[in-house]
Image (cartoon, rainbow, N blue to C red):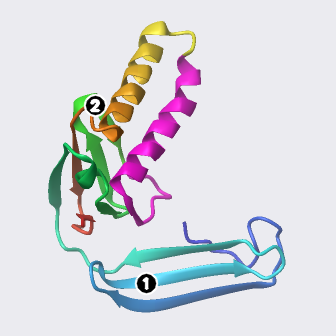
Amino acid sequence: MIILTDSCPVCNSKNIEIKTIEYDFPEIGKSLLYTFKCNSCNYKTFEIIPLEDRGYIKIEYKIDNKEKARKLLLKSPYAKIILKEIEVEITPGIESKFEIRAIDDFLMNIKNNLERFKILYSDDKEKYNKIIEKINYIEDVLNNKKELTIIIEDEKGLSKIY
């Protein structure tokens, strides 16, 4: 999220530094690198804003062993992620950013979010149990007991698996 202000969103100090640099990233192309730093409370944030559109891409990637789960995922802020077998869909939001992380770490993050999310359905046994099933399925994938297909739909064509 780009901060369009003359003060820090955390401490309201005006002692801030904002920098924007145009940079040509090998995998992303020309982009705007935006950094924000508060010199009072040390709050920092940065964002990469792509200036190029490479066109819609769809990637289907099957995880059927630990090697494939350890591959790197470059997820753009425009990417929708679908975990096919467990019907989980992660859509890009207003604060979506580029992420680069191992797929197993990405799945662990989804599992942890589902763990936190399940409390909302403690009164609805059916929905609660479905969330538990999704959590267990992800654990089985991470333990090499089940397969999972990740589908990445990126309208700007900037996501990739390495």
For badge 2, the amino acid type reads Glu
66 over 137 or under it: above or below: below
Residue, x 73% and y 71% (percent of image)? 43
Question: Is 42 displayed left or right of 147 in the figure?
Answer: right
145 over 29 or under it: above or below: above
- Tell me where the magenta segment starts and ends, as one range: 92-121
Residue, x 77% and y 64% (percent of image)? 10
When asked about the image quadrant of residue 79, the answer is bottom left
Residue, x 24% and y 67% (percent of image)? 162
When asked about the image quadrant of residue 12, the answer is bottom right
Q: Earlier in the sequence, mark 1 or mark 2?
A: 1
- Residue matched to label 2: 87
For badge 1, the amino acid type reads Leu
**In the rendering, at what x and y percent does residue 52 appear?**
27, 79
When asked about the image quadrant of residue 160, the answer is bottom left
- Identify the element where label 2 is drawn: loop
Q: Main secondary structure of the magenta part?
A: helix
50 over 148 or under it: above or below: below
The circle drawn on residue 32 is 1
In 3D space, how far apart are the residues under numbered discs 1 and 2 (Cα atoms)?
34 Å
